[in-house]
Image (spheres, grey):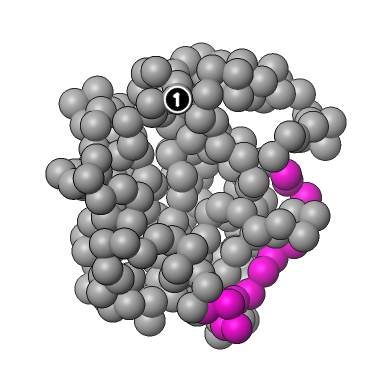
């Protein structure tokens, strides 16, 4: 793929955290900034879309700094994550050959994982490509463009798991050495744990996910 767009989901209400988790201070910068910087360090990944919702006004200034494109999901509260995925997908360039789907609260994501997915996409013909650690699949997920019409046609009561189940026979997994593909940050306790782990070398980190 000459250009691979990325969609970051950041529309949720962060109810368990009690505040906008994407903007929590994380070793000198907002948590979401770590993810944006990793994505922007890989030339093939462009453009970057961030789906906003409950904290649209708070997140938008950060996206301006990083020149990421904000797309707003007005139905984030009533229709949930699937509607945010659909909003992001609806804004993809018409000629894109695929896209990355990422969670907005994964500051541990590495270029190693992203490059492994991109490399796999050059040889695998699978409709979805997903990292795997210790037998468990995580995020981000690389989708082929052939999935786009299907994603947009999913009913409101469907979920991402619905889509992934449909492609279980046409999925390629990429083994990685980073357990953080299984982790996101939803609670104050997970945030505190992530702050401690971030300073450690990746090979020494432990994960409870």
- The stretch in magenta equals 167-179
Residue 179, quarter of the rendered image: top right
- State the image coordinates of residue 114 (x, y, percent, origin top left): 58, 55
Report the residue at 24% width, 32% height from top.
Answer: 54
- State the image coordinates of residue 58 (x, y, percent, origin top left): 24, 23
Q: Nearer the viewer, residue 52 or 91?
A: 52
Query: Is residue 37 something that shows in the picture?
Result: no
Query: Is residue 79 something that shows in the picture?
Result: yes
Could you tell me which quadrant the C terminus lies in? top right
Which residue is under mark 1?
Answer: 16
**78 to the left or right of 195:** left
Report the residue at 48% width, 35% height from top.
Answer: 105
Report the residue at 78% width, 50% height from top.
Answer: 177
Q: Tell me if residue 195 comes above or below residue 145 in the rendering.
A: above
Q: Does dot 1 land on a helix, a strand or a loop?
A: loop
- State the image coordinates of residue 83 (x, y, percent, origin top left): 27, 55
Residue 129, quarter of the rendered image: bottom right
């Amino acid at each position: 793929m000459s250009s691979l767009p990325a969609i970051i989901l950041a529309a949720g209400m962060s109810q368990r955290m009690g505040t906008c988790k994407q903007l929590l201070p994380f070793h000198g910068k907002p948590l979401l900034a770590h993810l944006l910087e990793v994505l922007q360090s890989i030339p093939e990944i462009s453009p970057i879309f961030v789906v906003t919702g409950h904290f649209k006004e708070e997140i938008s200034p950060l996206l301006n700094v990083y020149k990421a494109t904000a797309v707003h999901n007005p139905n984030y509260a009533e229709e949930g994550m699937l509607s945010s995925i659909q909003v992001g997908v609806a804004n993809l360039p018409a000629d894109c050959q695929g896209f990355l789907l990422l969670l907005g609260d994964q500051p541990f994501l590495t270029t190693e994982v992203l490059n492994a997915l991109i490399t796999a996409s050059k040889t695998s013909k699978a409709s979805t490509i997903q990292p795997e650690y210790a037998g468990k699949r995580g995020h981000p997920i690389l989708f082929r463009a052939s999935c786009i019409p299907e994603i947009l046609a999913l009913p409101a009561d469907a979920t991402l798991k619905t889509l992934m189940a449909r492609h279980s026979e046409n999925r390629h997994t990429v083994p990685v050495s980073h357990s953080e593909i299984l982790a996101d940050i939803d609670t104050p306790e997970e945030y505190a744990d992530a702050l401690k782990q971030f300073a450690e070398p990746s090979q020494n980190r432990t994960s409870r996910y």
